[in-house]
Amino acid sequence: MKKVLILILIILSVVFLGLQLIQYEAQAAGVRALLMVLLTSLYCLKVSEKRPFFFLFLITFTIAEILNFISWYVDINSESLFDYYYYIINGLYILSYIFLIVRILRDMNLVEVIKKFPLPILLLIILDVFFVSIVTDTTQNKLTRHEYSLEYFYNAIIMLLVTVALINFMYRENKKAMNLLVGSIFIVFSEVVQMAYFYVAEINILNVLCSIFLILAFLFFYLQANLPVLKERLN
């Protein structure tokens, strides 16, 4: 059953990228949602040492993907200026990343981490603020004030994710932490490319790149989930 699921996931990933290439966006959204459902199922079946917050991350992300697929076919905004799907789906993505951040933080001794890396943490926070401001400003003339605020918060969360993953790797220096970091970096790549596609230039190759980065991100997240949880790294 597990091997069959893995094979189906590989085939669907190829199908998903193929649909993106030929710009069948609605169908691609459906395959992407199915991929997340199957990946979550594989996590439940194959990973023996499950982490509650990582599972919540997968579940919340999957729900967001399902709603994103539904939004292609069900219009709940026909008589409203308020885009419910935009806020609900992006809110779910934000919540999923928060769950992933909490999952990483729960395995760290925060007091020890702050004592060991005060300067790197400060520099990373400054870089995060700068990066988020620069990236989000590309949407300023295309979004309402509320949408811009949501995008800013969204970008802040994904940068916080990669920052926490980097600090976790500096603290632990093991393969599990490295996979989490690489997966988080691919998430950032995916989100930044997606913003470029939506708000800068609707070039289809950007959309395909976004999807490739997302698939790679979840590949590394799944790889880290299969590795055993190690005790905290001590001096």
Image (cartoon, helix red, strand yellow):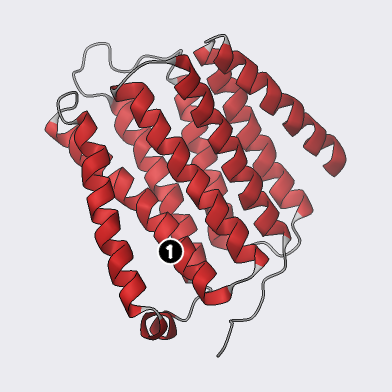
Q: Amino acid at mark 1?
A: Val
| For residue 194, side relative to residue 178 (left or right) | left
Numbered disc 1: secondary structure: helix
Q: Is residue 229 above or below residue 206?
A: below
Percent position of residue 119, x then y: 31, 76
| For residue 209, side relative to residue 119 (left or right) | right
Q: Is residue 111 above or below residue 164?
A: below
User: Within 10 angstroms of label 1, few (less than 14), some, or many (20 or more) residues?
Assistant: many
Percent position of residue 94, x then y: 38, 46
Residue under the image location 54 percent in, 10 percent down: 24
Q: Is residue 210 above or below residue 80?
A: below
Residue under the image location 45 percent in, 60 percent down: 101
Percent position of residue 64, x then y: 46, 35
Q: Dividing the image into 4 quarters, which one contains the C terminus?
A: bottom right
Q: Is residue 102 visible?
A: no
| For residue 47, side relative to residue 17 (left or right) | right
Residue under the image location 54 percent in, 37 percent down: 214
Residue most toward the bottom? 235
Q: Dividing the image into 4 quarters, which one contains the N terminus?
A: top right
How many tags in the picture? 1
The residue where tag 1 is placed is: 164
Percent position of residue 192, x then y: 38, 36
Of 36 and 193, nearer the camera is 193
Residue under the image location 43 percent in, 85 percent down: 112
For residue 17, which quarter of the picture?
A: top right
